[in-house]
């Protein structure tokens, strides 16, 4: 908690979708004492949130920390400017960092810091620790989601219809994390996050399955290297507001934010 005489940490949120709304609601409810929500940035009207809608420039002036819940374009176009302004940035659209130019721009910007939330995946702590001891030899991420959530604008009508109508699991992608996040930008932040944890996004092999029985979004993370062999399986309930993301993500964002603002709790 904030000590007597200390100022609260001012937080702005970019994006008022399923994740952003949940984060804003928790901050307004006082889930993080000493944290003051100062505004939301979104191209759409967000008057029902009870939080002032401001421009990105306004957010950079008012906030100590900006939480990005809006998509990879925001990171690519505005991330460096936020950091150069001296504001810390919490990233949820980790797939943006698969672009080496975006990653380099963020790495050289500052004095603001950027951090990545764990989002819908676990086990990142041990993967990060093991990678620090010795590089991994192999890393794989297999994700299974409901077919309708994987339909993309670049698919033609026939392919999209086949995907929606499939009655059995279908592998619709196999390849590296960078290409996966370009083709499925709202569905494979997990692969990018694992890549950052192991220190080499290019090492991550991705499989994406469209599964009509995937009531829970499943992620299987496997890694092998000199330190050992690791396997994690996660099954998350999709968000009721946006089935493309897991319902746990806003809570992961809040946990990451608590660490960023100097209020860590529990296991770190």
Image (cartoon, helix red, strand yellow):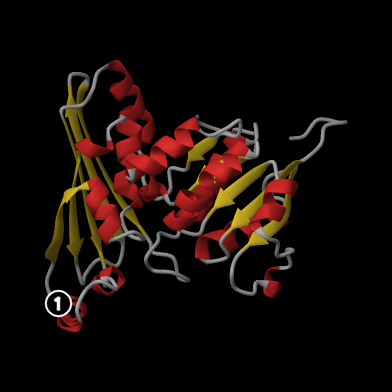
**Residue at 37% in and 65% down:** 244
Rendering quarter of residue 217 = bottom left
**Residue at 35% in and 33% down:** 197
From the viewer's perspective, tell me whether residue 118 is left or right of residue 142: right
Image coords of residue 198 (percent x, y) = 30, 31
Q: Secondary structure at mark 1?
A: loop
Screen quadrant of the N terminus: top right
The residue pinned by badge 1 equals 166
Rendering quarter of residue 23 = bottom right
Residue 248 in view (yes/no) = no
**The furthest residue to the right:** 5
From the viewer's perspective, tell me whether residue 182 is left or right of residue 210: right
From the viewer's perspective, tell me whether residue 112 is left or right of residue 231: right
**Residue at 65% in and 36% down:** 86
From the viewer's perspective, tell me whether residue 161 is left or right of residue 191: left
Q: Is residue 72 above or below residue 32?
A: below
Q: Nearer the viewer, residue 60 or 226?
A: 60
Number of marks in the image?
Answer: 1
């Amino acid at each position: 908690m904030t000590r007597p005489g200390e100022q609260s940490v001012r937080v702005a949120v970019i994006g008022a979708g399923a994740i952003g709304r949940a984060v804003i609601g928790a901050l307004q409810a006082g889930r993080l004492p000493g944290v003051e929500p100062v505004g939301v940035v979104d191209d759409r009207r967000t008057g029902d949130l009870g939080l002032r809608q401001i421009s990105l420039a306004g957010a950079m002036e008012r906030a100590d920390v900006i939480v990005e819940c809006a998509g990879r374009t925001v990171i690519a176009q505005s991330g460096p400017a936020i950091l150069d302004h001296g504001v810390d940035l919490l990233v949820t659209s980790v797939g943006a960092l698969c672009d080496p130019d975006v990653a380099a721009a963020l790495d050289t910007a500052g004095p603001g810091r950027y951090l990545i939330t764990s989002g819908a995946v676990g086990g990142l702590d041990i993967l990060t620790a093991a990678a620090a001891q010795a590089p991994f030899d192999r890393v794989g991420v297999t994700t299974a989601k409901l077919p309708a959530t994987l339909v993309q604008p670049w698919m033609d009508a026939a392919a999209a219809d086949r995907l929606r109508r499939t009655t059995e699991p279908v592998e619709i992608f196999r390849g590296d994390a960078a290409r996966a996040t370009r083709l499925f930008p709202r569905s494979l932040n997990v692969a990018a996050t694992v890549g950052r944890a192991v220190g080499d996004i290019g090492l991550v092999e991705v499989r994406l399955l469209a599964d009509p029985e995937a009531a829970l979004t499943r992620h299987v993370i496997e890694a092998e290297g000199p330190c050992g062999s690791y396997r994690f399986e996660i099954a998350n309930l999709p968000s009721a507001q946006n089935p493309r993301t897991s319902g746990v993500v806003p809570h992961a964002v809040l946990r990451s934010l608590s660490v960023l603002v100097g209020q860590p709790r529990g296991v770190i």
